[in-house]
Image (tube, rainbow, N blue to C red):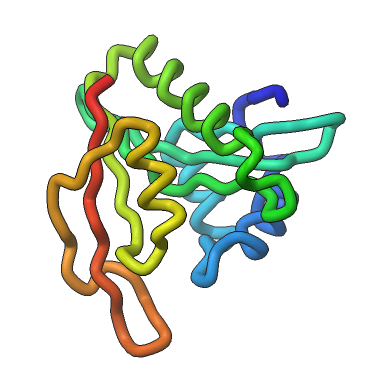
Amino acid sequence: MKCVPLTAKDIDAVLALEERVQAYPWTRGNFVDALAAGYDGWVARESDTVIGFAVLMRAVDEIHLLVIGIAPELQRAGRGRALLDFATRQAREAGMTRMLLEVRPSNAAAIAFYRQAGFVEIGRRRGYYPASAGREDAIVMAREL
């Protein structure tokens, strides 16, 4: 797996992947806006195929993991962890000292994934995510870099 910067030419592939891995996916506009704002974006490739992506936003000395995804058929084989580790190294090299993220309380697999990567719960955001029955809270997690 090779990780390279996300560019405008990757958006179609990333959007198609995002729509496969998220119940409430980012839109094309979200990805275009993230690139325009200068956020850190990465794509993971295998044999020239986009198999994963991550978008992160810097804020002073912290970095916020906004979205990450790996093709469903390739999950649970270490690729997500490799992509997260890559993004973490890039953030550390850029002088970031902490990584933050939000995750749905209903997403037990993601919570376990982040805990295994060293993240701990530091708070909650009420009604943060859209859900089938209104809104769902977000667990805020952080990891020191």
| Residue that lies at the very extreme toward the right in this rendered image | 47
Above or below: residue 70 compared with residue 138: above
| Residue that lies at the very extreme toward the left in this rendered image | 123
Q: Position of residue 46 (x, y in %)?
A: 79, 31
Above or below: residue 138 compared with residue 34: below
Q: Residue at x 55, y 49 (%)?
A: 32
User: Total of numbered circles in the picture?
Assistant: 0
* Residue placed most toward the observer, 10 or 88: 88
Quarter of the rendering containing residue 101? top left
* Residue placed most toward the observer, 134 or 37: 134
* Residue placed most toward the observer, 92 or 76: 76
Quarter of the rendering containing residue 42? top right
Q: Residue at x 84, y 32 (%)?
A: 48
Q: In which quarter of the image is the C terminus?
A: top left
Q: Which residue is drawn at 14% across and 45% down?
A: 122
Q: Position of residue 70 (x, y in %)?
A: 63, 46
